[in-house]
Image (cartoon, helix red, strand yellow):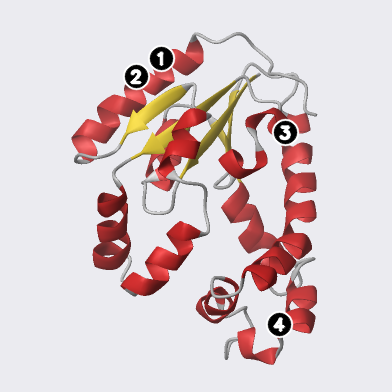
Amino acid sequence: MIRIGLTGGIGSGKSTVSDLLAARGAVLIDADRIVREIQAPGGVAYQPIIDRFGPGVVAADGTLDRPALAAIVFADEAARKELMAITNPHVGRIMAERMAAEADTDNVVVLDIPLLAEGGKARYGVGGVVVVDCPIDTALRRLVDIRGMDEEDARRRMASQATREERVAVADFVVDNSGDLAHLTSEVERAWAWIQSLPAGGTPPD
């Protein structure tokens, strides 16, 4: 198993890169998707989130109202940390279980972790870190024009993450996503070739 960390700021195009890597044969373990699983009705984080943040974060269909929850936690750092305290231990446990299932394979396992730079790459025991990078104004434009986010909300979310410079500082390989999809695809091809050149395994988690 070759274990790689993948990260990038909101609006960087990290999810597109993870999908392109999966299309090339990588096994994707996506922290954001795990968050959605555990926050779904019946998931281990669902009721604790309601207990902490109240019925206002529940949508009419019984699922969590993610925009309502985001409006709370991205406006209040203490609330954001409380949400992370509810979800992060479960996400870490599930990611470890899914990694363990791949331990005896020859697969490339990509850990898609939005906050990898904040947690430090040694924490995840990866053999290398791929960072998806683009200019801040490009990321902001994508969030507003493509995702339909309110600009102020997008700026708050970006401010809650590591800086562009902090992410690049932990990178072993940088994927430039400042251009179009054809450019990004060529960048992913370069990244895939680099990943396949790495030795199996990773570094021991701390």
Residue to which mark 2 is pinned: 190
Q: Secondary structure at mark 3?
A: helix
Marks 1/3: CA distance?
25 Å
Q: Are marks 2 and 1 in contact (CB under 8 Å)?
A: yes
Marks 4/2: CA distance?
44 Å
Residue at screen point 49% across, 38% down: 166
Residue at screen point 26% across, 26% down: 186
Residue 60: x and y, percent? 57, 91
Marks 3/2: CA distance?
26 Å
Residue 181: x and y, percent? 23, 40
Residue 18: x and y, percent? 45, 39
Give above or below for 83 relative to 100: below
Give above or below for 28 relative to 104: below
Residue to which mark 4 is pinned: 53
Which kind of residue does numbered mark 3 sit on?
Arg
Marks 1/4: CA distance?
45 Å
Residue 193 marker: 1
Q: Are marks 1 and 4 in contact (CB under 8 Å)?
A: no
Q: Are marks 3 and 4 in contact (CB under 8 Å)?
A: no
- Looking at the rendered image, the quarter that the N terminus falls into is top right
Given this view, does label 1 or label 3 mark the residue nearer the observer? 3
Q: Secondary structure at mark 4?
A: helix
Residue to which mark 3 is pinned: 123
